[in-house]
Image: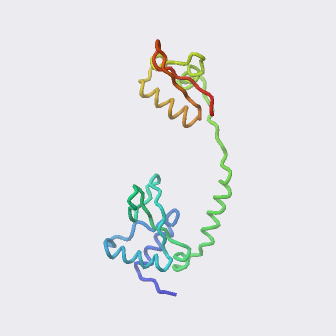
Amino acid sequence: MTKLTETQTIILSAGAQRPENIALPLPKGLAGAAAKMAVSRMIEHGWLREVDANLRRNEPLWRETGDGQGTTLVVTDAGLLAIGIEPVVVKTRVAKFCVANAEPEVKHPTLRTGTKQALLISMLQRPQGVSMQEIVAATGWQAHSARGAMSGALGKKLGLVLVSAKDDDRGRVYRIGQSV
């Protein structure tokens, strides 16, 4: 087995302690060509692997791929073994987490009566619908806040299907529609 350098040991040990075994950031002072060479060698040995970075979770980038995405570095099972950590323990924890979350429970939010959101829903359920001016007058919200509540809280969180139509007398009229 290949003997690890001090830098390789530091990278693998730090990565093993991070969530999802992410090897970045590299040690202070390791940058440029030296970093590229060290990482390339570790990838050749199978100790590190490049994977797509999840930018929503702010995972650190190793390199950009040119399509607005990037990759990050992850310590592999071989990398864990190289520093004396048994990867089975890590996989067992991950497997238990995956099995427990295989069938995620759908949580339905409870609606509280007497809130502006409940008022908005009741107005949207009327057969004639509701105009933006009526929503603003009833809730005291600005128009952009009402549109945000309809899109975010009602549409995305509660899963309600909202439809709108242009009315000659009232302007745009909003209703809760039927899901497709």
- Quick one: 37 or 3, which is closer to the camera? 37
Rendering coords of residue 109 (x, y %)? 62, 35
- Quick one: 80 or 37, which is closer to the camera? 37
Count of all numbered marks drawn on residues in the image: 0
Look at 39% across and 77% down and name the residue there: 38
Does any portion of residue 133 appear in the rendered image? yes
State the image quarter where residue 106 is shown: top right
Q: Is residue 27 left or right of residue 127?
A: left
Look at 62% across and 67% down and name the residue there: 91
Look at 46% across and 52% down and name the residue there: 56
Placement of the C terminus among the 4 image quadrants: top right
User: Which scheme is used to colour this image of the protein?
Assistant: rainbow
Rendering coords of residue 71 (x, y %)? 44, 63
Q: Would you place residue 159 above or below residue 66 in this image? A: above
- Quick one: 170 or 71, which is closer to the camera? 170
Q: Would you place residue 135 above or below residue 45 in this image? A: above
Rendering coords of residue 16 (x, y %)? 51, 70
Rendering coords of residue 89 (x, y %)? 62, 70
State the image quarter where residue 123 is shown: top right
Does any portion of residue 139 appear in the rendered image? no
